[in-house]
Image: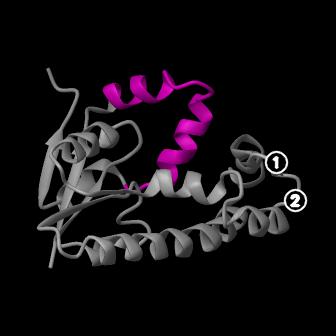
Amino acid sequence: MSLVLGLTGSIGMGKSTVAAMFADAGVPVFDADAEVHRLQGPGGALVARIEAEFPDTTTVLGVDRTLLGEAVFGNPEAFKRLEGIVHPAVAHARNEFLKANADKPLVLLDVPLLFEAGGWRQVDKIVVVSAPAEVQRARVLARPGMTVERFESILARQMPDAEKRARADFVISTGDT
């Protein structure tokens, strides 16, 4: 039976870098964001359902994230409908990952919305990746296509960093000097 670590943190905190360090050390890592991209990519299992719920948001390449974002950002009811499609599919993939790696001593679940989506109930210990707010903001706004409005919209849907840190078993601080 594996020790299951849940890795989380708000946008721009360095979760991907920390997850890569675990992977480099041989720890199996489930990347929830990568799973969402797979489910919404070409031939992805959620493409048809998302198109049915949010018309004109897909192409032959799968879900067009820009078009889908325009359909749901700023619309809490639409966003909740999208989460109702995506979260169960990601949870299923996560459960399959855990079954496939049950014989490993340690596994890592890299889940940005670990607290918000209830995934914390499936882990033994919680690791929160955190950085100073100004470092986080600079990292996120340096991303292609990111705007202040989109960044603030994402933050509004995420549990505040201080609360995540308070609920963590371990905190990894990034961006400190």
| Residue 43 figure quarter | bottom right
Crowd tier of the residue under label 2, counting other residues whose Cα lies within 10 Å: few below 14, some 14–19, many 20 or above: few
Instruction: Identify the residue shown where x is 66% and y is 51%.
Output: 41
Amino acid at the residue labelled 1:
Val
Residue 55's disc is 2
Dot placed on the residue nearer the N-terminal end, 1 or 2: 2
Location of residue 24 with respect to 68 vertically, above or below: above
Q: Is residue 63 visible?
A: no
What's the mark number on residue 76? none
Which contiguous range is marked in magenta? 134-159
Question: Mark number for residue 60?
Answer: 1
**Vertical comparison of 85 with 26: above or below:** below
Above or below: residue 156 compared with residue 138: below
Residue 135 percent coordinates (x, y): 32, 26
Display colour scheme: one colour
**Label 1 with label 2: CB-CB less than 8 Å:** no
Instruction: In this rendered view, identify the residue nearer to me: 124 or 150.
Output: 124
Q: Which percent across, then down, holds residue 34?
A: 48, 51
Residue at 26% across, 32% down? 132
The residue drawn where x is 18% and y is 50% is: 26
Question: In the picture, which quadrant includes the N terminus?
Answer: bottom left
Q: Is residue 40 left or right of residue 154?
A: right
Cα distance, mark 1 to mark 2?
Answer: 14 Å
Of badges 1 and 2, nearer the viewer stands 1
Q: Where's residue 171, x and y in %?
A: 15, 49
Q: Main secondary structure of the magenta part?
A: helix
User: Exactly how many numbered labels are in the figure?
Assistant: 2
* Percent position of residue 169, x then y: 12, 61
- Location of residue 84 (image quadrant): bottom right
Does 129 lie within the magenta span?
no
